[in-house]
Image (cartoon, helix red, strand yellow):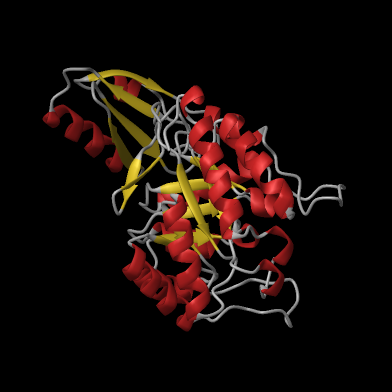
Amino acid sequence: MIIVMRVNATAREIAAVVERVEGMGFHAHLSEGEERTIIGVIGDERPVDPGLFERLEGVERAVPILRPFKLASRDFHPKDSIFSINGIKIGGKGLCIMAGPCAVESRQQILEVAHAVKEAGAHVLRGGAFKPRTSPYSFQGLGLRGLELLAEAREETGLPIVTEVMAPEAVSMVAHYADILQVGARNMQNFALLQAVGQTNKPVLLKRGMMATIEELLMAAEYILSNGNSRVILCERGIRTFEKYTRNTLDINAIPAIKQLTHLPVIADPSHGTGKWDLVAPVAKACIAAGADGLIVEVHPDPQQALSDQAQQLRPEVFAKLMDDLRALAPPLGREL
């Protein structure tokens, strides 16, 4: 349920409603807009009489939320969420481009890529220090050393970094180095991990699971939001279908559909979505045209020598051309880059 306060509701009236909500054993989540405050009533599935709140001073109306995701819903937060990460805005009119290698492989590699994507205009450096791989014999990442190298790249370029965290017990360590915590597709429904990142003060990039529905993605986001972390970025990275020509089927439909349902920013991952470097640029542009708030793209100085995801990583010069194309595409779409 959401409780919509009157335009002129006082702080005392808002506090009284919050007290009533919490006195009933629920949690109260405040969303303060330019004109009015909306209070979300979050808790178990007990039916609640709207009249219990509509009789309180300062309340305009109380409206049940029928969707299972409450805090992620536009019913609770009608306007787009916009937040900053080290001065970089996520959401809103501007596009945020995250770029870097699939995995941090060496100091030389990550620094070379970091400078290249920064020069091309990327806003955030991506790179995996811990890599969840299908095979236990595949490269698993450099671990702590990878985090240290990412931090060094941030120091040299000024780019904030996003990297994946794979387990609840690793959250504090990864959060010490990263500016954005990534929850990968394989961990989208790792509920202990979702709760752990929800209890941090770091933004979370939540990737859609390989076989997850849109509602399941939003319910995963709800776990993070309900633990107090409001800075969640959703990522469409393709789902597994019967098609084998591409690595995944990137669900461009999902981008506008998700943006209708939620206020959270949505970015796309055309690298994992296609699995082929020569498909990344056209699909990336299609995602922006569909309404994505940004992209996360894999870039490597020598993809053929990469220790993971060789086929989908762009060379720096190809990424730079993509950025030029996006600069031309953004203004007609009412976006900025």
- The quadrant of the rendering that contains the N terminus is top left
Front-most of residues 183 and 286:
286
In this view, 272 is above or below 253: below
| Residue 12: image location, x then y, percent | 12, 31
In this view, 23 is above or below 135: above
- The quadrant of the rendering that contains the C terminus is top left
Front-most of residues 24 and 61:
61
| Residue 211: image location, x then y, percent | 73, 50
Residue for point 67% across, 48% down = 280
Residue for point 67% across, 40% down = 283
Residue for point 17% across, 22% down = 9
| Residue 98: image location, x then y, percent | 49, 53
Q: Can residue 103 be seen by looking at this rendering? A: yes
| Residue 336: image location, x then y, percent | 42, 33
In this view, 179 is above or below 35: below
Examine the image and state in which quarter residue 251 appears: top right
Residue for point 40% across, 26% down = 78
